[in-house]
Amino acid sequence: MSKLTIRGGSAVRKKYVYFFDEGNAEMRDLLGGKGANLCEMTRIGLPVPPGFVISTEACIHYFENGKKFPEELWDQVMAALARVESETGKKFGDEERPLLVSVRSGAKVSMPGMMDTVLNLGLNDETVETLSRIAGNQRFAYDCYRRFMQMFGNVVMEVKKDLFEHALSDLKDKKGYKYDTELTPVDLRELVDTFKGIVKKESGQEFPSQPLKQLEMAIRAVFESWYNPRAITYRKINEIPETLGTAVNVQTMVFGNMGENSGTGVAFTRDPSTGEKKLYGEYLLNAQGEDVVAGIRTPQPLEKLKDELLEAYDKLAGIMDTLEQHYEDMQDLEFTIEEGKLYMLQTRVGKRTAAAALKIAVDMVEEGLIDKKTAVMRIDPSQLDQLLHPCIDPNADFQVLTKGLNASPGAAMGKVVFHADTAEEMGKAGEMVILVRWETTPDDIHGLVQSQGILTSHGGMTSHAAVVARGMGKPCVCGAEEVKIDYASKSCRVKDVVIREGDIITIDGTTGRVILGEVPLIPPMINEDFRRLLAWADEIRKLGVRANADTPEDAARSRDFEAEGIGLCRTEHMFMAEDRLPHVQAAILAKTDEERAEPLQKLLKMQKEDFAAILKAMNGLPVTIRLLDPPLHEFLPNLGDLRVEVAELKHRGASLEELAAKEELLANVRTLSEANPMLGLRGCRLGITRPDIYQMQVRAIFEAACDVVEEGYEPVVEVMIPLVGIDKELALLKESTEKVIHQVFEERGIRIGYKIGTMIELPRAALTADEIAKHAEFFSFGTNDLTQTTFGFSRDDAEGKFIPEYVELGILEKNPFEVLDTEGVGKLIDMAVKLSRQVRPDIKLGVCGEHGGEPKSIKFCHQVGLTYVSCSPFRVPLARLAAAQAVVEEEREVFIDK
Ligand code: PEP
Ligand code: MG
């Protein structure tokens, strides 16, 4: 909604600039996250240096109008600046009391380090002298000035960062210094002159000395940074819309570098790694913002501040408590202490690991701060994956090479690479890589995405690598200082061990350990917080959650994850086993029913054992067993390979018998092979044309069920017929299936309840769901095939061939094999749900395609009223949570609509 202000009683002018006391936390869309929270902190009376926010609408206007500021903007900036001046008693460019400001970006959604910031704006050759006089510290003033030139030169005037860095290190070398702090005021003055020269040479312009000019250029640069490559990549990965734009925060500078009673730091109200309730953070005395993350000096843990500046510490601890109570969530904040006085520069909801998110959500419910539904909404379902990451087997034997900080949990193994580009290249080629860097910067984002884990030799828990890895749920070890990297030779040395690019290492982000070579990894344990939160999710959700499981091990794992049954047991996986394939092939190649009987009998015995084990593991819970689906030739040797083998036999002069057998096999495979096997003789078509295979499977299922009943178990069997498109297919197969079931019951003198249903994975099946439902007690939407057949996209090829390009071009919003296409495929599902319930109101409806484990698709399944989703066992926790979130979101949407 746009805000309008009436000026001068008549003209209606749009308001683009908000003083910090004119906004609040609700105004994120307009003021960005940082701006809205600066306003909120001002509103609740916290010590925030005065300033104002230029709205995201100004940024949007800028890009929509050929990169021009809105007409009203500058007047409003000047008015806000005048107010800052009157509140601080300082003046822009003043030689007595110069005002310095920071200019920072701030989008609605936090994009750490992706856009630009300029500090100390307002300095020039005159104001630097005044600052020096007021502070009584020439070194401080010139240090601010050279930092400003460096930042402004790079961010606003686009001069390469390295040029400034090199000039700085050249000067230090010349003077024989090790640390920046050794630079004298005279040195810094010399550096400022060198920087001016660099700017002039590189940009062709003088460094601007007018503070207002500097401000205008900085605002423009922050707008422009919305489209820098880092920000574009970050938005793409995090699905942040381009249309949001960034706000610009202009705020009075406070100085953490005014001596030993000044400092700056970052803090979390709870430990972002573990969730433990304690003040957590890092600070540096006599330093400015970027020093904490730049890694030139090692930041101190926050508790130490108590010994150094007790008053500021106590004040900070009180504010952290206030903020957490106020926002009812863990906060991540930035502060500066200027000569003993504390100022708040930022607060936002803190990013956290999945383990921390769970602990914080559960603890906050216990503390009475939030309710269970809020707690359930606080966990990102895909973040749960982090907890399910492998960790190092505690019984494994290995030697720890070195240790760093345990920056992001989980263990990862891979080939060492030293450059983000190499990580991207190898990662995309399917290699597992560990990116090893001195430290990472936002420019490395593409490499981080493709790495299994990240190891840095420098930087703390709040360094870029740590923050980004936690967000992505990737294992990360930071600040492993014994790792000495030599980028030029693509190697690193840890004590006397040399690791070259391509060598394998294992990192453990939970403990900070770095290990040479491979180490056995095991899936992590699910802790009590995890169980409690998911139990709350179970209370809330309406959708059932089942697992796709084909083996007794998968079935057991499904139960561990509290799946409510098996929604899809694909029997073809059992056919593929090495010891079974010869019998499967013999059955396929048999010429007569009699010939086929023997191998089928062998398979019957094996399948019966499989089914019995699965039914036992799932005792009392439904198990949906799908009859054979893929085309038969998939079980036979490859046609091309066979041709080569026949040619070789001929060439080698093999015996006539051997050659004839191979040629017969070749002829058989040729007969069975199809131009479009996905659309060919598979699923129920196979069951109809080769009835003895399905009959064998049904017999195996029910003999197994009778066996386990005799052992005292309670099998709940659902037989699922795949790829039905015509109601008569199902009617026919239902009849033959029931015939076998009753034969088995007769033979065994046992009767067991069962259901027969079908998969809906063809558009025709969805369109005629009312007819099909007459013969089916349940439907399971096979959204993999339904996506394939609705789009006419081959599920084997499309994702590798053109879908990424379609997504890039915006033709598709998402890969529809990953996230359900609700508009097309979803429409068919919705239609089938309604049609089927017309004829069979109590029909059970589920999804068992990959979408059953994807949060957005799960939400859709809830909305159309399905009974359950079924997904891989490891995704079950995620699905339980996503199903609960769908309910809460729906309730909240209804509430908002009212
Ligand atoms: C489906 O098509 O969605 C499905 C679950 O079956 P499959 O992936 O085995 O074809
Ligand atoms: Mg299918």
Image (cartoon, rainbow, N blue to C red):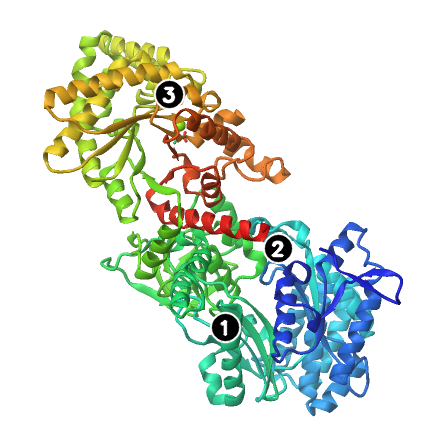
- Residue drawn 25% across and 11% down? 661
Residue 474 percent location from the top left of the image: 43, 56
Q: Earlier in the sequence, mark 3 or mark 2?
A: 2
Determine whether the residue tagged by mark 1 lies in a helix, strand or loop.
helix
Image quadrant of ligand 2 equals: top left
Rendered view: 609 above or below 690: below
Say few, some or many: other residues with alpha carbon within 10 Å of mark 1 (under 14 / 14 to 19 / 20 or more). Answer: few
- Residue 325's label in the rendered image is 1
Assess whether mark 2 and mark 1 are in contact (beta carbons under 8 angstroms). Answer: no
Which residue position is annotated with label 3?
774
Residue 805 appears in view: yes
Task: Using the rendered view, name the quadrant where residue 122 is placed.
Answer: bottom right
Say few, some or many: other residues with alpha carbon within 10 Å of mark 2 (under 14 / 14 to 19 / 20 or more). Answer: many
- Residue drawn 45% across and 30% down? 833
Q: Is residue 420 left or right of residue 551?
A: right
The kind of residue tagged 2 is Arg
Whether the residue carrying mark 3 lies under 8 Å from ligand 2 is answered with: no
Count of numbered labels shown in the rendering: 3
Task: Using the rendered view, name the quadrant where residue 594 is placed.
Answer: top left
Which residue position is annotated with label 2?
230
- Residue 245's label in the rendered image is none
From mark 3 to mark 1, how far is it between C-alphas?
Answer: 57 Å
Q: Earlier in the sequence, mark 1 or mark 2?
A: 2
